[in-house]
Amino acid sequence: MTPATPIPAIIPDAVQTALAEPPACTAASASWCARFYQWTNNGSLASAADAVVTPTLRIVLILVIALGVRHLLHRSITRLVAGATNGHVTKLLGRAPKRLRAGANPLVTARRAQRARTIGSVLRSITSAVVLLIAAVMILAEFGVALGPILASAGIVGVAVGFGAQNLVRDFLSGMFMLLEDQYGVGDIVDLGEASGVVETVGLRITTVRDHQGTVWYVRNGEILRVGNKSQGYAVAVVDLPLAHTADMTQAGEIAGRIAASRVEGEDIKDDVLEPPEVLGVEKVTAEGVTLRLTVKVNPGRQFAVQRALNAAITDEFDEHNMPRPGPFATRGAADGAAAS
C-alpha cells in the first residue's frame, strides 16, 4: 500500500505570513488600526479597528453630548419657570392690600406652582424630543444610512397624522396658551359657556369643572371659546334688595349702608372684605317694585358668602323699620300688625 503524501508545510506558513504582514492602514501611527496591530500583531483585527471602533466612539460621544444637553436644558427650564413664577407671586402679593395678601397667598401660590409644573413639563418634553431626534439622525448618519428617504417618509406620515389629529393638536395648543396667559387655575370659579363651576384640574387637553350641583364636566380646551373667571384678583358681592314703589329710597339706602358697614366687621367675613360696602342706589324699576343695589369688593371666591351674610342682616333691619316690599314680600312689622288686628 502506497503511503499518503504529506501535506506541504508551506500552506500554514503562507497563511501565517499573510496574517503577520501589517495592513496598509498602519501607516498612520495615530490610527486605531496601528494601535490594534501594535497590541495584537494581527492584521485582520487591525484592519477592522477603524471600521468598528471609530464609529462606536462617535456614537457614544453623540449620546453623551445629547444626554448632557438634555440635562442642562431640563435644569434651566425648571429654574427659569420656578423663578419667574415665584417672582410674579411676590410682586403680585407685594402690591395687594394686607387682607388680600393674608387671604389669597396659599391659593395664589398653589395656582402658580401648578402652572409652573405644567409648563415646565411640556417644555421639558419638547426639548427631550428635539435633542433625541437630532441625536438619532446623527447616529444613523454614522451607519451610512441615507436620511433623505427617511425624512421624506416621516414628513408624509406627519402630515397624515396631523390631518387625523386636528382636534387633539388644537386642544393641546389651546391648553398651552391658556396656561401661558393664566386664564384660570385650580380653585377658580369660571363660566366656560356650557359648563360653569369650580375648576378641579387643568390639563393640556382637558379642563375639569365641578358645578354647584356636584356634576363634574370634562371640557376640551379646544372647545372653550370664552372664559369668565370670577376668582381672579378680586370679586364683587352684589346685594339686590327688592322694595315696594312706596318705600323711602333715601331711608332704605341709609339703612342698607349702615347695616352693611357694621356687618362686614363680623368675624366670619371680616378677612374676606377688601373695601367698604357701597350703596349704588336704585338698580331697576319694574311693575312689581324697585330694586336697590349694594356692592362690596371681596377676596376671590368669597363673594357668595359675603352676599348671603349682608342679605340676611339688611333684610332683618328692613323688617324692623317696616320697609314695604313688593307684592309677595311682607315686612315683619306689617305681619305683626295684621295679626294684632
Image (cartoon, rainbow, N blue to C red):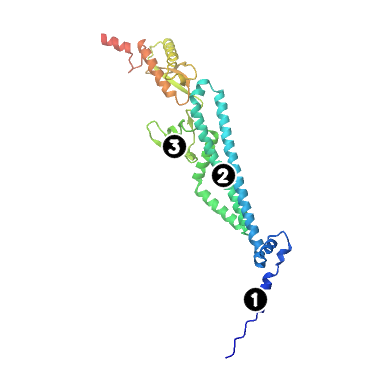
Task: Read off the residue under disc 1.
Answer: 12
**How many numbered marks appear?**
3
Lower sequence index among marks 1 and 2: 1
Within-10-Å neighbours for mark 2: few <14, some 14–19, many 20+: few
Residue lying farthest bottom? Answer: 1
Q: Is residue 73 left or right of residue 18?
A: left
Crowd class of label 3 (few under 14; some 14 to 19; many from 20; radius 10 Å): some
- Mark 1 surroundings: few (<14), some (14-19) or many (≥20) residues within 10 A: few
Residue 160 vertical position relative to residue 339 in the rendered view, above or below: below
Residue in the foreground of this view, choosing between 264 and 312: 264
Q: CA distance from mark 1 to mark 2?
A: 61 Å
Per the image, the residue denoted by label 3 is 208
Foreground residue, 87 or 21?
21
Q: Amino acid at mark 1?
A: Pro
Do the residues under discs 1 and 2 have CB atoms within 8 angstroms?
no
Amino acid under disc 2: Ile
3D distance between C-alphas at marks 3 and 2: 25 Å
Compared to residue 62, the image places residue 284 above or below, namely above
Q: Earlier in the sequence, mark 3 or mark 2?
A: 2
At which x and y percent is residue 335? 30, 12
Quadrant of residue 219 within the rendered picture: top left
Three-letter residue code for mark 3? Thr
Residue pointed to by mark 2: 126
| Residue 190 percent across, percent down from the top left | 46, 31
Could one spot residue 31 in this view of the protein? yes
Asked which secondary structure carries label 1, the reply is helix
- Residue contact at pointers 3 and 2, CB within 8 angstroms: no
